[in-house]
Amino acid sequence: MSKQYRRKINLKLAANQPIDISQKMEFYRQSNELYRVLVDQAGVGIFVTDCEYRLINVNSWLCSMFGYAKEELRGKSSAKLIVAESLNNGYDLVSNIKEGKKIIEELWCRRKDNSVFLCEITINILSDGRLQGIARDITKYRQTELALKESMALYQAVVEDQIELIRRFRPDGTLTFLNSAFCKYYGKDMDELLGQNFMDLFPVEDRETVQRQIFSLNKDNPVAIAERRFIRPNGEVVWQQWTNRAVFNESGQIVEYQSVGRDITNQKQVEEQLKRSETRYRAIVEDQVELIRRFKPDGTLTFVNGSFGKFIGQPVEEIIGQKFTTFIRADDREEIRKKVYSLTPENPVVVTEPRFVDNQGKVHWTQWVNRAILNEHGEIVEYQSVGRDITAQKKAELKIAEAREATERASRVATLAVIGGGIAHEINQPLNAIKVLAETILYLYNSRKEVPVEEIIKNVTNISRQVDRIDSIVNHLRSFLKYSQSFKYIPCDINEVVENSLSLVNNQILSRRIKVIKKLEAVLPVCGCFVRFEEVVLNLLMNAVQALEPYKQEQKEIVISTWAADHKIHLTVRDNGPGIDPEIAQKIFEPFFSTKDAGSSMGLGMSIVHSIVMSSNGTISVSNNPGGGAIIHITFPSC
């Protein structure tokens, strides 16, 4: 009610105050005005019709509802405001009204702009035959109600289709809703369960824990997850996981709880088996003398066994959480890290041999078998490594390598002895030239003839050239016999290797009347050590010479070929001798294996050839030529 009407109307009269007729009239007028204001400002449409059902009085709300002014509605037949499809119902209403019945009906009505809306109309017939009614626009209400019904139907369908267990219960624990999966799981009808306290479904000894967890939910923490037991009638214990959510009203008060659960018995059994397996695993791991570690993809150690801690010299608890590379010598870390992190699902294992320096500064060699651990998506989630101390093995290998190098050096010396005649001839040639040139100068001097300066310079220059040639031969021999465990790998021209090797043994070959045929094609360089490649070719040439030496035939020949094919450089040394017995073909690369007399060969030549070829990532094979003789075939990758 507006303030002006509140000021005008004063219904309170003092006790025992006499009332005259004018006061009564004023009181009536004020009461009538109050009624009119209340009706006009009511939140529903109010109307009165005459006996012919024409509108004679309407309030503002009704006018607003239908979009008419009051003057437009007065005198208008109420039936005109009803949609044509609803007229039959309207005429039925008339007959019901005439019988004096109170009518409450929902009718589709039409506004002035021809839009329609659903209206709830309550009609009473007055004593004089007029109608008094109330109209409410319930379009939005019905739309909301329909949407709610559809939502509820959808919710019900979704809930009923779930394999999860769904329940709703009041704060006092009374179950108000359950889905079919819940009833089936508990083996009871819905009618048996609804209205029951949900706490009755838990073992007595668990109820206090359940209650404490459920009733701890609040506005700040409305959700909680818990794992609960359920004991079936046959005594079987099953496990469930429940997600409990508190439902609040607009005042923030809990009005209900909703829970979604699932059976996790199998998961619990697997977890229990996993725990037992983990216990056994740890027992086995702790009993191992091998070093065992596990670390995350970022390198953080998550587990080490006692042997690892003892080897490192630190308590296991202090080691956990450190990076695995902490226990690797600094200059080895980057290489080891690259190898470990190169693991993939296709290649999940790699072996590494890092060094470790203990607290006393002593260097230990270790060997680790590193394995990537993958999840179900093929992603690496962890690494596991099993290691052992190989320091003693490394020392033994070093001694063996030193002994092997000494043996190989002895073999090279033996090779030098074989080719010694050729080398002597190579040196004798420049020595003889030097002698002739020097004697020529002396002769000219002793003859007391005037010697042209140009002649002297020419002879001295030739002497210098011959000395350079001798120096070159000696340096070549020195590099060939040089003792070294490490070789510098550089691009080498394999054809130049062949030519240099031939220059050392050419005289021996010619003296045995063996013809050398060279078929050298232009090829890409090979990465390796030039001197070691010379050693390969020299050994192959000398083997061919020795194979041909006792062989009686007029034409003895050695064919050396090089060519490129399939991204590789090929080298073959072929002779036309007796060939190789297939039964010993695979043994010729073994150390100390020889078909010659015990005193004439150490049996290391082909073993050395094999090791040099393998260390250069090459291949070597032996076969017999269909036309007679043996073929040694070597391949190298190009640089």
Image (cartoon, helix red, strand yellow):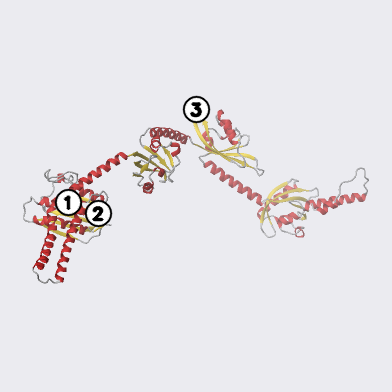
Residue shown at the point (23%, 46%) measured from the top left: 405
Amino acid type of disc 1? Asn
Q: Is residue 69 above or below residue 249?
A: below
133 lies left or right of 211: right
Dot 1 and dot 2 residues touching (CB under 8 Å): no
Q: Cα distance, mark 3 to mark 1?
A: 85 Å
* Amino acid type assigned to the residue bearing label 3 in the image: Gly
Task: Give the mark, 3 or 1, whose residue is nearer the N terminus.
Answer: 3
Residue 6 locus on image (x, y percent): 83, 51
Q: Going by the image, does 42 lie left or right of 183?
A: right
Viewer-side label of 3, 1: 1
Q: Which residue is label 3 attached to?
A: 235
Mark 3 surroundings within 10 Å by alpha-carbon count, few (fewer than 14), some (14 through 19), many (20 or more) = few
Foreground mark, 3 or 2?
2
**Between marks 3 and 2, how big is the CA–CA gap?**
80 Å
Q: Residues within 10 Å of mark 1 (few under 14, many from 20)?
A: many
The local secondary structure at tag 2 comes to: loop
Q: Are marks 3 and 2 in contact (CB under 8 Å)?
A: no
Residue 625 appears in the picture as rendered? no
What residue is shown at x 51% (from left), y 28% (from top)? 233
Q: Element at badge 3?
A: loop
x then y, percent, for residue 167: 57, 38
| Residue 529: image tag | 2
Query: In the image, what residue occupies the spot 24% across and 52% down?
Result: 618
Marks 1 and 2, the one that precedes in the sequence: 2
94 vs 147, nearest the viewer: 147
Residue beneath label 1, please? 539
| Above-or-below relation of 162 to 570 | above
- The secondary element bearing badge 1 is classed as helix
Up-down: is 308 above or below 103?
A: above
Q: Position of residue 610 (x, y in %)?
A: 21, 48
